[in-house]
């Protein structure tokens, strides 16, 4: 956001003129940005940091928090963002562009941390929240895993990946060709072990990455006549991940039961009965695709079987664009699902995206705090979450997203940046007013709920009492109101809101659109002109008392007493002309105010007596609007006017109060006396060719005008056409090799002293097609010869000058209708550099955009659509004290507190109920017991444990672990306490004396082993499936028996490790428990019994090995048809 974006042009001879500029002195930076871009298209939310991110179609990302904290990230490529997600509570934002660039944005440093170009078209993206792992699905059906390494600040592509063929083969199904992945959703509360993969043709697979197997398959049929349904959107429709809502291209919505129950006999794999329910929003034949699906759980506690489903699409093609909210619930199974309410929300603009904002402190059944709906162009509408749970309430009206600086509603018409003196009582008064505004009412939702966006941390500098208000930003609106903000730091804060109407006094036209502004920092006075010709004068008041209000017209002057509150109070309204005010300028240190009108007239007001000094026509017979006014204090004006060339002075004035230079739209410059209003000179000055003027500046030179350089400018930018206008050119070279231009000197000897006094002052006239530089003397005498003219190749619409180190004007900024900002040095008008609004802000120029631009010494405020931006041009200036004054978008204290709370919560849950289950997965395997549902340890496992486990899973290729089984069997984790050891043996030991029952059991086992066969068994053909089922492992049978014996021995060793580890853990975690030693003794006895049973199992294995040898010999004697 703060990177250099300045592009230098062709090098100029920077040492040619004192006061000139070099390109190295420029550094274009974005100081602040407010508002939602008009190209906004996608949203993301961090529920812990409470930040909202908005991606755009032009590569920008807007981040919004609380306390007026906003940030703007700009991608190097102008490519739309198709995926956007936070790494929750970790300070990073991940975006995926249409060009398949995966970009990581550092919220703390406000810059891109890393970018990775993906080698395929990314069609699905999801983050395992709480970790730095991300799933990526592409157009070829490949699901990959990427990890962001926060220490190395890089994206790592991990070995783990699954192809469509690999997944479907593991699921026991087949695909005719590769299908793109259209959705990836990690299943809730599975510690990232299970992920849902949705393919374009409608196939849905719940995949377990820990064992590389398909848990559930939906949307598949082996029937060749089965019609595939193209998936468009999907979301979980339950907090536990048991119900999945899927939207299709034909407008259908299917709710799938994703429970991992075994299919009934004869049923299609993964499609059990009562596993799906269809929803249709319209009965029409042609319906819109289901573009967006979101789920909000019911706000009722302990209710995991109901909520609201938010749907965009599914309506009849051609119908009104709405967002549908369905309130659904089910009692037992999904087959009992019913819709209990439906609300259609009308949209103000075309739909772009929506997001549900949860309440702070997210939990399983946490009600939604707010619904944000994004529409084009850049409009964000808010619905209170409290109303969403009330199914009987018609949510017809939304709340407009609160903005700090209104631009559209109400419509901004003009703006101004002004400096405030840091010393004196005025700064303190402004600071007190701003403090009262900060303590005002914070934004809330419609029913009074707390505003859900509270993220970010203000800069400590904003609380520094030693720094007052140094800069203010003022904006005028179409409804006649004025708003003022403190612009000292890159976070604006409101200071005052002024209504156009005067309380208690009826003045016609006070609510007209504001058309002109000026502020005097010396007297803390604000002048406001509107389209009805009224000029309001406000003054800063430090106390609430009674003051005089002046209503001044062309014929009357009324004085009223009115109560004045602390802040800016209206002290006068001037109504001398029924014509829009086009320019306002305080002169004489705020003692007087000059107003220029649309009709071509100029009025001067005295701020001391609040009266009209004079009112005059600039150019008789012309109604061209007055667009600029400048004042210069001069002496001996009569000697200049009475030169030999101008022997007909018209009421010359010797007053030292000053001379007014007035510019009209048709490029006429009129010089008048600032006291009497009389015109100085015989006739108005104007260029020979007709043109449209933009602005005029009085420049104080640092050397005689004859030394102003006229070096040739780069041909691609501009050209010097003084020869075409009759100006004599001198070909004499200066010592440095350049060609200075000879200036005319028509002054007589008697006016030489005055000419020398004026020789350092220049008038710069900026027009749409050219720049012209004149001496002050030639303007006063009405001469049209310029000392410098530059024709512009592009159409100019706005200009301003700036100074270096508070010195004299040294640079000129031009804005072209192409959106290019060009910087030129003064007074030589050399091109120093150029930057475009498109490359800087991704803005294109819009009509009347120049009306709302304002500047102050290289700091420019621009408005475009819903956006406001301040950009700085000078490298030596740091108006906002960046980066020290920037608010932090990532709250480290909050992040640490959230992590500590999660760790403490997981430890507490372990201590209360899961200590026995730590080693249960090893021990209970001995029993072969099976639970009804897999245990979920996501609530009790610390984040570090989950990350370590996933890191181990994703660090290897799937199916590469030989111990991994693809059999559909629940992963069972048991504890030592779950082991049940019966002292009465259910089977006799094979190494001790055998009783009658023992021998009978042995004979039965042998009979089962040999299948009850005798030597005279009859031949029977057996299928290959039966043979594989009976003898899965190949090789020597004795080797199999030996392997079984070794595994039993290995299991015994594991039990000893379990005993030692378990004993250490219990001693650590149960130090303060009274019965700790009793538990240890009890577990010791159990382990002793386990050891004895292990010995018996080993002896049994030896007996089994002998039987296996006998079996092997007998099998060798059989024929192939006896198998």
Image (cartoon, rainbow, N blue to C red):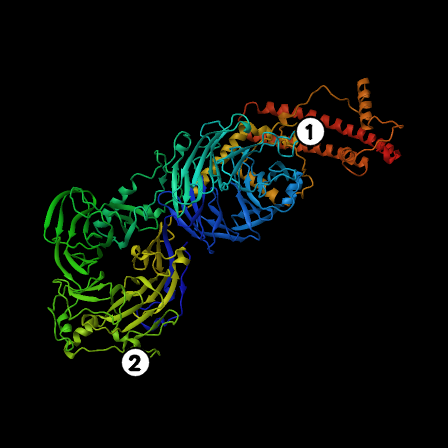
Answer left or right for 730 relative to 327. Answer: left
Q: Name the residue under label 2.
A: 730
Count of labels shown?
2
Instruction: Report if residue 1015 is visible in the image.
Output: yes
**Mark 1, secondary structure of its residue:** helix
- The reply to whether the C-beta atoms of the residues labelled 1 and 2 are less than 8 Å apart is no
Q: Residue at x 17, y 54 (%)?
A: 578
Q: Which residue is farthest bottom?
A: 732
Q: Which residue is farthest top?
A: 996
Residue 294 to residue 99: above or below: above
Q: Residue at x 42, y 30 (%)?
A: 391
Residue 1099 to residue 185: above or below: above
Residue 1026, x across and y down, in percent = 77, 33
Residue 129, x across and y down, in percent = 51, 40
Answer left or right for 954 relative to 65. Answer: right
Residue 439, labelled with which disc?
Answer: none
Badge 2 density bin: few <14, some 14–19, many ≥20, Cα 10 Å: few
Instruction: Report if residue 890 is visible in the image.
Output: no
| Quarter where residue 497 is shown | top left
Q: Name the residue under label 1.
A: 926
Inter-mark Cα distance, 1 to 2: 106 Å
**What quarter of the picture does the C terminus occupy?**
top right
Q: Which of label 1 and label 2 is nearer to you? A: 2
Residue 388, x across and y down, in percent = 41, 33
Answer left or right for 19 relative to 212. Answer: left
């Amino acid at each position: 956001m703060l990177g250099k974006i300045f592009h230098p042009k062709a090098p100029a001879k920077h040492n040619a003129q004192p006061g000139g500029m070099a390109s190295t002195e420029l550094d274009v930076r974005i100081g602040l940005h407010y508002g939602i871009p008009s190209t906004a298209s996608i949203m993301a939310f961090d529920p812990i940091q409470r930040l909202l991110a908005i991606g755009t179609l032009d590569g920008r990302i807007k981040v919004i928090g609380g306390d007026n904290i906003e940030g703007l990230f700009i991608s190097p490529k102008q490519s739309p963002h198709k995926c956007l997600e936070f790494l929750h509570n970790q300070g990073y934002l991940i975006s995926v562009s249409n060009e398949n660039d995966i970009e990581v944005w550092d919220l703390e440093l406000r810059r891109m941390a890393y970018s990775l170009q993906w080698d395929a078209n990314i069609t699905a993206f999801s983050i395992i929240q709480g970790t730095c792992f991300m799933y990526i699905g592409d157009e070829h059906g490949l699901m990959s895993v990427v990890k962001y390494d926060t220490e190395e600040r890089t994206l790592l592509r991990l070995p783990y990946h699954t192809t469509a063929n690999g997944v479907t083969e593991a699921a026991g199904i087949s695909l005719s060709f590769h299908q793109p992945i259209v959705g990836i959703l990690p299943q809730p509360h599975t510690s990232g072990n299970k992920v849902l993969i949705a393919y374009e043709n409608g196939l849905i697979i719940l995949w377990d990455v820990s064992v590389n197997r398909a848990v559930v398959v939906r949307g598949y049929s082996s029937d060749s006549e089965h019609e595939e349904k193209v998936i468009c959107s999907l979301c979980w429709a339950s907090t536990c991940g048991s119900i999945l809502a899927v939207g299709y291209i034909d407008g259908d919505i299917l709710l799938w039961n994703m429970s991992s129950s075994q299919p009934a006999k004869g049923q299609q794999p993964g499609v059990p009965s009562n596993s799906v329910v269809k929803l249709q929003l319209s009965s029409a034949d042609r319906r819109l695709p289901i573009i967006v699906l979101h789920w909000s759980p019911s706000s009722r506690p302990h209710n995991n079987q109901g909520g609201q489903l938010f749907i965009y699409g599914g309506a009849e093609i051609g119908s009104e664009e709405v967002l549908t909210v369905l309130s659904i619930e089910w009692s037992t199974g999904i087959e009992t699902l019913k819709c209990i309410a439906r609300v259609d929300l009308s949209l103000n603009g075309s739909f772009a995206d929506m997001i549900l904002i949860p309440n702070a402190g997210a939990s399983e059944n946490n009600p939604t705090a707010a619904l944000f709906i994004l529409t084009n162009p850049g409009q964000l509408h808010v619905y209170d979450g409290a109303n969403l749970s009330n199914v009987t309430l018609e949510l017809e009206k939304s709340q407009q997203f609160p903005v700090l600086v209104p631009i559209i509603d109400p419509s901004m018409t003009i703006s101004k940046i002004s400096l405030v003196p840091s010393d004196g009582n005025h700064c303190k008064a402004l600071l007190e007013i701003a403090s009262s505004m900060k303590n005002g009412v914070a934004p809330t939702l419609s029913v009074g709920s707390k505003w859900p966006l509270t993220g970010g941390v203000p800069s400590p500098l904003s609380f520094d009492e030693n720094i007052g208000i140094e800069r203010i930003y003022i904006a005028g609106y179409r409804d006649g109101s004025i708003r003022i903000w403190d612009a000292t730091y890159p976070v604006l804060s409101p200071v005052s809101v002024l209504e156009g109407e005067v309380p208690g006094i009826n003045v016609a036209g006070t609510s007209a659109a504001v058309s002109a502004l000026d502020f005097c920092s010396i007297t803390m006075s604000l002048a406001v002109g509107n389209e009805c010709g009224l000029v309001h004068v406000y003054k800063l008041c430090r106390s609430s008392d009674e003051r005089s209000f002046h209503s001044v017209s062309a014929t009357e002057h009324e004085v009223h007493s009115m109560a004045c509150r602390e802040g800016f109070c209206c002290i006068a309204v001037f109504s001398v002309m029924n014509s829009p005010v086009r320019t306002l300028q305080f002169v004489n240190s705020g003692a007087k105010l000059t107003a220029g009108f649309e009709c071509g007239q100029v009025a001067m007001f005295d701020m001391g007596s609040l009266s009209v000094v004079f009112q005059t026509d600039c150019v008789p017979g012309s109604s061209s609007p007055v667009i600029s006014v400048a004042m210069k204090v001069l002496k001996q004006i009569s000697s200049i006017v009475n030169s030999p060339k101008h022997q007909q002075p018209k009421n010359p004035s010797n007053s030292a109060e000053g001379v007014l230079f007035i510019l009209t739209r048709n490029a006429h410059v009129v010089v008048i006396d600032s006291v009497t209003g009389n015109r100085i000179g015989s006739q108005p000055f104007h260029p020979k060719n007709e043109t449209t003027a933009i602005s005029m500046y009085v420049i104080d030179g640092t050397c005689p005008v004859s030394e102003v350089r006229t070096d040739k400018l780069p041909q691609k930018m501009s050209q010097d056409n003084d020869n075409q206008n009759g100006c004599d050119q001198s070909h004499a070279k200066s010592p440095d090799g350049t060609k200075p231009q000879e200036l005319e000197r028509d002054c007589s000897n008697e006016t030489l002293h005055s000419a020398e006094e004026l020789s350092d002052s220049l008038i710069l006239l900026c027009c749409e097609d050219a720049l012209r530089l004149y001496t002050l003397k030639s303007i006063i005498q009405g001469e049209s010869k310029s000392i410098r003219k530059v024709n512009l190749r592009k159409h100019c619409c706005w200009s301003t000058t700036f100074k270096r180190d508070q010195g004299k004007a040294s640079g000129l900024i031009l804005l072209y209708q192409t959106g290019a900002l060009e910087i030129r040095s003064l007074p030589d008008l050399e091109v120093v550099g150029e930057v475009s609004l498109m490359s800087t802000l991704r803005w294109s120029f819009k009509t009347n955009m120049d009306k709302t631009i304002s500047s102050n010494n290289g700091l420019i405020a621009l408005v475009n659509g819903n956006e406001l931006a301040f950009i700085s041009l000078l490298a030596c200036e740091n108006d906002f004290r960046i980066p020290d004054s920037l608010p932090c978008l990532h709250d480290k204290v909050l992040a640490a507190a959230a992590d500590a709370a999660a760790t403490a919560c997981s430890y507490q849950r372990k201590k209360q109920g899961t200590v026995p289950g730590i080693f249960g997965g090893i021990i209970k395997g001995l029993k072969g017991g099976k639970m009804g549902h897999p245990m979920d340890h996501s609530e009790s496992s610390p984040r570090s444990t989950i990350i370590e486990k996933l890191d181990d899973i994703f660090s290897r290729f799937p199916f590469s672990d030989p111990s991994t089984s693809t059999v559909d069997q629940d992963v069972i984790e048991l504890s030592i306490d779950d082991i049940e050891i019966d002292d009465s043996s259910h089977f006799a030991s094979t190494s001790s004396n055998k009783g009658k029952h023992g021998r009978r059991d042995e004979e039965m086992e042998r009979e089962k082993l040999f299948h009850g066969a005798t030597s005279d068994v009859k031949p029977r053909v057996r299928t290959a499936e039966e043979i594989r089922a009976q003898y899965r492992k190949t090789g020597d049978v004795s080797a199999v028996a030996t392997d079984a014996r070794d595994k039993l021995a290995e299991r015994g060793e594991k039990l000893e490790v379990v005993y030692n580890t378990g004993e250490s853990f219990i001693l650590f975690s149960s130090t303060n428990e009274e019965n700790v030693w009793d538990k240890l003794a009890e577990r010791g006895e159990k382990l002793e019994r386990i050891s004895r049973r292990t010995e018996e199992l080993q002896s049994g294995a030896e007996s089994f090995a002998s039987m296996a040898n006998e079996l092997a010999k007998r099998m060798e004697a059989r024929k192939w048809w006896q198998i």
